[in-house]
Image: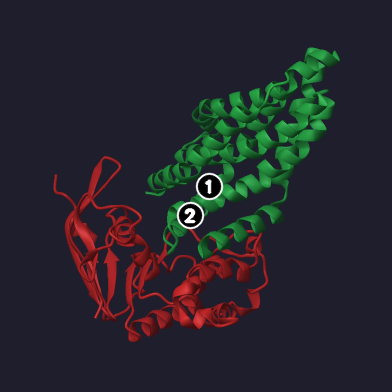
Chain colours: A red, B green
Amino acid sequence: MPHFTGTDLVCFRGERTVFTGLDFALGAGDALVLRGPNGSGKSSLLRLMAGLSRPLAGAVTWDDESIADNPEAHNLRMHYIGHADPVKPVLTVTENLDFWTLLRSKANDELRQPNGVGEAIKSALARLGIGHLADVPGRFLSAGQKRRVNLARILAAPATLWLLDEPHTALDQAALRSLDDAIAEHRRGGGMVVISSHAQAAPEDADAIDLGQFQERL
Amino acid sequence: MRGFIQIVRRDLHLALRQGMDSLMVVAFFVIAVVLFPFGVGPEPNTLARIAPGVIWVAALLSSMLSLERLFQTDFEDGSLELLALQPVALEITVMAKVSVHWLTTGLPLIIAAPLLAVLMNLPIEGFVPLIIALSLGTPALSLIGAIGAALILGSRRGGILLSLLVLPLYIPVLIFGVSAVDAVIGGFSAKPQLLILSGILVAALPLCPWAGAAAVRQGIE
């Protein structure tokens, strides 16, 4: 059973301590919701989990091995969705997704099949209800559609850990439901999800961390 | 290696779709060189004397012109962050981006250079060393420039900062690139200069992607 933990994390950004003494632990099938007011460090914590930045103190570990020791292995088992949706305006939706999925195809048997990547992308787009946009260039997409393309990216190439930073932004009701379904299915398959959100939309049985508690008292 | 090829393919694809960037670099190169006969007068001997230097300086400036965008567009739309989170070493990613930068700017410059050498009345025996020196020098320019391009991520007015960072580092390439051509025109062998240029390239190949990747990590943190 894989487990993903953080112990005694201290995050320091822009000459300010964002949070101190934060712990978290996730096992297979677990979900964790990060709550807290703006600026309380939800995104910062997700970036620590992704390995984009390092904690000032404490450690983020996967199966008791620090993620900083083997970043490529961590990248392979993890998907990250940040504030921006990296959809290139001059490439079509399929071309955009092709690139990101192919980068991860070597470690996945299904994707390595002939046309495996194409099929995976098609079904991911269909699940998010944007199958009809497959050949549309990125510059014609709305904010919500770009977000859906970004979500299709993580559905197309399986990875155990999903780190989703405000994934609900710009999505309509139908897309929110498909996202919830996708998260539920991912967890049933033993996946882990960390979501930052101040909306109510979050899995009901998820653990929650309120980052407001970990702010340094002045 | 697969990751390297994927990133090169995607960036070439993007460069072809956007098209204008590499065309603009070559156009700048041509115009910058063409300005000199107007500036210093059309006297053939004077032009022949300054031809290698002018062509090299113009090549160096035009190569730098497009450097700012090497990481900037990917940085702005979040792609760079995501590229750093793929199971491909960031050094490989940087190397792939540098390769594409050279293919879309360095290579067109080398192709345009003989035409401009004719325009500048460069003696005929200088053509071959000019091409060889540019072939060794422009990849080094792209590699060295990548460090600067990564360091300016997130800063405003990055373009000016970039030239301040990168141009001093370009000086060795410029000196040996020009003197290789001058040596052959003067009746000497260009071997030492070309060997030094190769040496610069060989040193830059591993060092620059490594330093560039470190700077990118700093930039996206």
Q: Residue at x 67, y 52 (%)?
A: B15
Instruction: Tell me if I can see residue B42 in this picture.
Output: no
Classify mark 2: helix, strand or loop: helix
Label tally: 2
Q: Residues within 10 Å of mark 1 (few under 14, many from 20)?
A: many
Q: Position of residue A123 (x, y in %)?
A: 55, 83
Depth check: give the residue in front, B176 or B78.
Answer: B176
Q: Name the mark on residue B86.
A: none
Q: Name the mark on residue B71.
A: 1
Instruction: Indicate the chain on which mark 1 is placed.
Output: B
From what the image shows, is residue B123 above or below residue A102? Answer: above
Kind of residue at disc 1: Phe
Classify mark 1: helix, strand or loop: helix
Q: Residues within 10 Å of mark 2 (few under 14, many from 20)?
A: some
- Of tags 2 and 1, the one toward the viewer is 2
Q: Position of residue A79 (x, y in %)?
A: 40, 68
Q: Name the mark on residue B92.
A: 2
Where's the N terminus of chain A, which quadrant? bottom left
Which of the two discs, 2 and 1, labels the residue nearer the N terminus? 1
Instruction: Indicate the chain on which mark 2 is placed.
Output: B
Depth check: give the residue in front, B157 or A60.
Answer: A60
Instruction: Tell me if I can see residue B15 in this picture.
Output: yes
Depth check: give the residue in front, A205 or B21.
Answer: B21
Quarter where residue B192 is shown? top right
Kind of residue at disc 2: Ile
